Image (cartoon, rainbow, N blue to C red):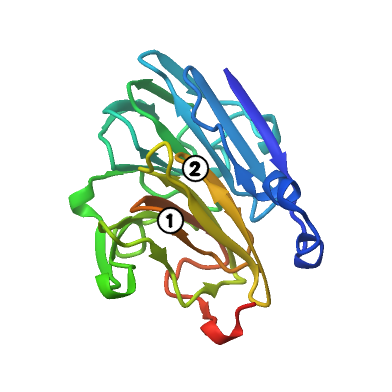
Amino acid sequence: MLSVETRHAIDPTTAKGLDTSGLRAHFHAGGLFAEGEIRLIYTHYDRLIMGAAVPAGGSLTLDHVAECGTASILDRREMGILNIGETGTVSAAGTDHAVRKGEVLYLGMGSGPVTFSGDGRFYVLSAPAHRACPSRLIRKEDARRVEMGAAETSNKRVILQFLHPEVAESCQLLMGYTQFAEGSVWNTMPAHLHDRRTEAYLYFGLGPEQRVFHIMGRPDETRHILMANEDAVISPPWSIHCGAGTGAYTFCWAMAGDNVDFTDMDMVAMGELR
């Protein structure tokens, strides 16, 4: 079963007037992981698609998506797939990929229909592409590892970069995830933004009673959205993105836009936040 929801882009002036339900309607994405289903959100922010496929021991095929305007979803797109569940199989272009928990599969433009099977819980990101790059399964040990923060500032974490120019070639999609040490909860403070690309986050590894306060908005008009386990959020180019949780957590980040320079960001001093 396939379902697709469209999210239109809105400007920061409109966003600052939204109440809690309005913010969640535009930016929050819950309930993506449904057994036996593929659920996608097609955003008008850099035409990024985010969603999930949960075959639940069976098989699900992602092929025609009307919103893409092509016969098959990857005719003019690329895709990154993160498995946050048990080992599962992703099949595309005649190749079966056994994807273990914490691994990322990259599928280049023209890879054809994508079939998900087994016990995986697959998080799916897709961006438009203008050239075909080689498909590749990226193991955790192959990811670029960046350690940041400290226990004293409650932000000790490791960033694992999978779709990154130094790891695996892509057209415009960047993707990886950040894991926090026990006792660390703050991410990306001081905050930053990057007007040249959209970002999306999936928060996972949270207990049933845990939450993450995802902070967004212009630096002088901040808002927050409460995130539960396996909730995702759209972070538009004009918005900061940072957060704090009630305990350690992991989040997957993905970006699409004008460039693939991971460090291309505009820092915001703490004193500028309101």
The local secondary structure at tag 1 comes to strand
Q: Viewer-proximal residue, 4 or 222?
A: 222
What residue is rendered at 29% in x and 71% in y? 148
The image's mark for residue 37 is none
Q: Residue 100: percent from the left, percent from the top?
A: 25, 34
Q: Amino acid at mark 1?
A: Gly
| Cα distance between the residues tagged 1 and 2 | 10 Å
**Could you say where residue 268 lies in the image, as x and y percent from the top left?**
54, 81
Query: Is any part of residue 128 visible from this angle?
Result: no
Three-letter code, disc 2? Ala
Residue 9: image quadrant is: bottom right
Q: Earlier in the sequence, mark 1 or mark 2?
A: 2
* Mark 2 surroundings: few (<14), some (14-19) or many (≥20) residues within 10 A: many
Mark yes or no: residue 146 visible.
yes
Callout 1 environment at 10 Å: few (<14), some (14 to 19), or many (20+)? Answer: some
Q: Quadrant of residue 222 in the image?
A: bottom right
- Residue at image position (37%, 54%) is 176
Residue that numbered label 1 is attached to: 245
Check the image and report above or below for 267 versus 57.
Answer: below
Instruction: Give the residue displayed 41% in from the left and 51% down from the top.
Output: 251
